[in-house]
Amino acid sequence: MSARVHDIRGSHHPRDKLGRPLHDLRISVMDRCNFRCPYCMPKETFHENYRFLKSQERLSFQEITRLSRLFASLGVRKLRLTGGEPLLRANLPELIGDLTSIPGIDDTALTTNGVLLAKHAVDLHANGLRRITVSLDTLDKEIFARMSGGFAQLESVLEGIQAAIAAGLSPVKINAVIERGVNDHTAVDLVEHFRGSPVIVRFIEFMDVGNRNHWSADQVVPSRELKDKIHARWPIRPVPENYQGEVAQRWVFEDGGGEVGFISSVTQPFCGACSRARLSSEGKFYTCLFATQGLDLRAPLRDGAVDSELLSLIQGAWLKRSDRYSELREQLREREPATRKIEMYYIGG
């Protein structure tokens, strides 16, 4: 298996205080979700009376496309659409079509919980989408219901994965958040189910999304533990990253059964190579997955700022960036707010 490594350096592109370029932009197109995963959007917080954004408070497709063009001029090469659940956003394939035509953007991807994927897979592919990631933490129906807040059926997600493959969105990546005592005993089942198919299962260490998920280190299943279990069943070997700063460690089955990945953001933080930023659905620019403060780009956009003014704001924020949350987790958790709003899926590229 050959690895295609991309050079993300550029002399005219901004670098933060640690010398990291801006290469990946995660765009939340929707703050709402049809799941209530305890580790991401717990229903005790995001209940029926929770105030989500109104339509006019979210960035329009035109605004997202304009900002994406500006980010591309600063070195962004990869866009990933997230939520909430992005497929809840009406006419999303139209936005995909606009984003995939931006000069300089080499890769546009989507992360979804998969429930609505069967309905939209063909249109997404027809409008230029080529990569998709589905969040799926277990194949056990009872555990799936508990981890999704009881809002969906496992069968719908599996149908969505098959529809994505049939539409040409392969290989499909599966992101599975593994929590000790919850779904860790079902992790190998995911590998067994998808091995030999155009699906790559990637295991993510349970992280602290703010303090909302009552995170503790005892709940983390280290990637090396899962790796050992899988290797004992099906021998695997490491392969090089696809590009500088890729978050997932890639391993392939020695018998040719495909690939599995591990995202070890707790036990092996990768802040030093992080080239990712995110844009929230209301237009705030965050320089870290865990950032509590963002730069408001919606206000200047709607106040008539020209491109050079917006570029100056974005570049200025990145040049001042020194985020290393995962490397400094314990110190920072002691002084961060008790809750915070983060619009995204768990990490994954």
Image (cartoon, rainbow, N blue to C red):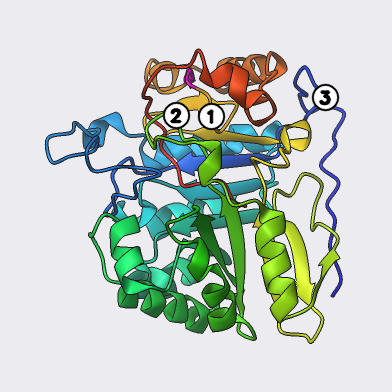
Check the image and report above or below for 242 versus 201. above
Residue ID at (39%, 60%): 113
The secondary structure that most of the magenta stretch takes on is loop
Asked whether residue 294 is drawn in magenta, I would say yes
Any part of residue 78 in sight = yes
Give the residue at mark 1: 290
Residue 210 numbered mark, or none: 2
Say if mark 2 contacts mark 1, CB within 8 Å: yes
Task: Pick the residue in front: 331 or 17.
Answer: 331
Q: Amino acid at mark 1?
A: Phe
Query: Picture coordinates of residue 311 (x, y %)?
Result: 62, 21
Mark drawn on residue 329? none
Give the foreground label among 1 and 3: 1
Q: Nearer the viewer, residue 122 or 48?
A: 48
| Residue ID for mark 3 | 19
Residue at x 71% of width, y 33% of height? 22
Callout 2: 10 Å neighbours few (<14), some, many (20+)?
Answer: many
Sequence-wise, the earlier of marks 2 and 1 is 2
Helix, strand or loop status at disc 1: loop
Spatial separation of the CA atoms under disc 2 and disc 1: 7 Å
Task: Classify mark 2: helix, strand or loop.
Answer: loop
Q: Amino acid at mark 3?
A: Gly
> Would you say the residues marked 1 and 3 are in contact, meaning their CB atoms lie under 8 Å apart?
no
Residue segment shown in magenta: 292-296
Q: Which of these two is toward me, 216 or 332?
A: 216
Percent across and percent down for residue 299 are 39, 17
Q: Amino acid at mark 2?
A: Gly
